[in-house]
Image: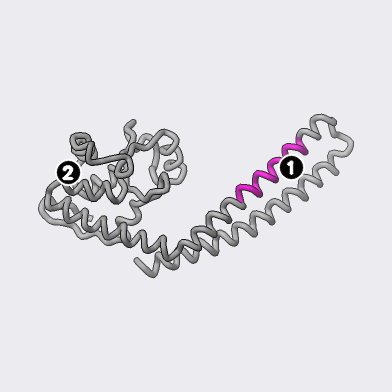
Amino acid sequence: MEKSKNKIIIYTSSIIQRKIFTIRDQQVMKDRDLAELYYVETRILKQAVRRNIKRFPEDFMFILTESEIDFLVSQSVIPSKKYLGGAKPFVFTEQGIAILSSVLTSDKAIEINIQIMRAFVEMRKFIANNVVIFQRLQKVEQKQIEVDGKFNKIFDALQRMKMKNNITSHIDDFNHIVSVIQTARNNAFAKVNEELINLYYNVGQFVYEKV
């Protein structure tokens, strides 16, 4: 998308929504993504916020911790730590973004803010309309973690038994037991993953219809 110093770009709601993510149970946007939308440098946006820090309580804006950054990198929300250039990102809730329009007072920033507010409204509608699916997703993902943990305990116990008893003469029998358990584990994961895929498909269909 070509940028112009004078022209105000109209973003579709879906483009902005892809920049919204959830952390600390809040939907937020990163400073860099907002700066890109406003056509200002990230450091300029941060400077404006620091000069008006009293307008940004923690439920409006907060700085990501190292563990949160690591998590977001693992989820591909942030490409890598190098991408951040050593800085910890500011992230803004919907209320914090609303305040930004009073800090960055250009016509461009005000117009973009209106578009962002509309995107947050659409995001809330999306979550509200799919709350049951998201709850099921969370339960299924938790089930997958629990199943994985139980099988890991079984494999650890078998490995300890093998080392303690120095199993050699019955190694084939031992390996057969491990193979049977591994097959059971794969079957359990296949069932859980099938349910996850169906749920993700349902969410994806809703997104496709709205875009």
Q: Where, by quadrant of the figure, is residue 51 drawn?
A: top left
Q: Residue at x 33, y 56 (%)?
A: 17
* Disc ID at residue 168: none
* Disc ID at residue 103: 2
Q: Please provide the residue range marked out in magenta.
A: 144-159
Kindly identify which residue carries mark 1.
154
Relative depth, front residue between 103 and 21: 103
Q: Position of residue 135 (x, y in %)?
A: 51, 58
Which color mode does the image show?
one colour
Q: Position of residue 39 (x, y in %)?
A: 19, 47
Is residue 189 left or right of 134 when viewed as pictured? Answer: right
Mark 1 vs mark 2: give the one in front.
2
> The N terminus is located in which quarter?
bottom left
Q: Residue at x 64, y 54 (%)?
A: 189
**Magenta span includes 152:** yes
Q: Earlier in the sequence, mark 1 or mark 2?
A: 2
Amino acid at the residue labelled 1: Ile
Q: Where, by quadrant of the figure, is residue 175 drawn?
A: top right
Is residue 149 left or right of 172 when viewed as pictured? Answer: left
